Amino acid sequence: MKLFEDRKAAVSALNELLPLPQMQRESWILIALSEGGIALCQELNVRMKLKVDWLLGESITAPQNPQCELGRVSETEEIVINDDLVKAFGIQYDYVYGEAHRKHEEKILSRIYHYRKGRPLTTLRGKKVLLVDQGAESGLKLMCAIKTVLSRSPDALYACAPVMPKEVYAAVEPLCDALFCPHVLEDYIETSCYYSELEDVSDEMIIKILGD
């Protein structure tokens, strides 16, 4: 089921829900959660010229199954864990925390230097923050981002995605000041299924957006 022709169409759907004049008046900070989220931020920001940044993170996966996501770690080493999966597979929490530290040291830090030249995540204390992604699967990425941003004392935290599973929306909505999503689906497959086209987002484009 294709809901959007491309990311531009997805942003048009989000714009029907987002309080655009308020965002501009209050100088919200747009925080992308993925490469696709960066592209959405750029499209959202065509007229508003708000601050954009990217909250980097990595999946923590099961020892013998890299497709099974047990948790998520952010660039500030905040961690969210799917406790039900960890217990179901009999995985030790020491493994999960060890993997989180390894992913942070080996992958996240190098991406911070590559995309932001080592600059830390922009200051969020006392700011109004909007998390942006092109969709959500398990919700772990979004939950980890919420935990990370809340630890940095924003004035308000909002989140948006053009499409997400009903159960993720229900879990996330109470944690935000507002959650904006035009399509909340009962039977979610994966995010790419809901776009006719998802253009690659180049490193050069990301570096330029974060530099601007």
Image (spheres, rainbow, N blue to C red):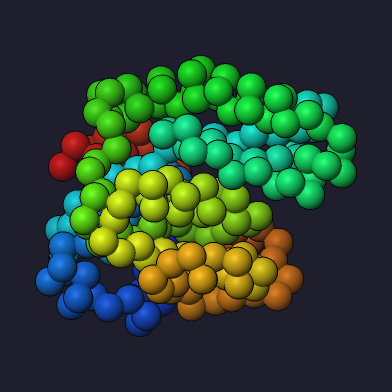
Quarter of the image with the C terminus is top left
Can residue 170 be seen from the camera position used here?
A: yes
Instruction: Between residue 138 and residue 115, name the one nearer to us.
Output: 138
Q: Quadrant of residue 205?
A: top left
Residue at the location (53% across, 60% down)?
A: 135
Residue 164, relative to residue 91: is it above or below? below
The image shows residue 107 at horizontal and vertical percentages of 49, 23
Instruction: Between residue 195 and residue 40, name the one nearer to us.
Output: 40
Residue extending furthest toward the bottom: 16
The image shows residue 124 at horizontal and vertical percentages of 25, 49
Can residue 52 be seen from the camera position used here?
A: no
The image shows residue 211 at horizontal and vertical percentages of 19, 37
Residue at the location (39% across, 42% down)?
A: 55
Residue 72, relative to residue 17: is it above or below? above
Residue at the location (24% across, 50% down)?
A: 125
Quarter of the image with the N terminus is bottom right
Q: Quadrant of residue 206?
A: top left
Q: How many discs appear?
A: 0
In-image side of 18 versus 182 (left or right): left
Residue at the location (41% across, 20% down)?
A: 110
Q: Quadrant of residue 127?
A: bottom left
The image shows residue 191 at horizontal and vertical percentages of 59, 58
Residue 58, relative to residue 147: is it above or below? above
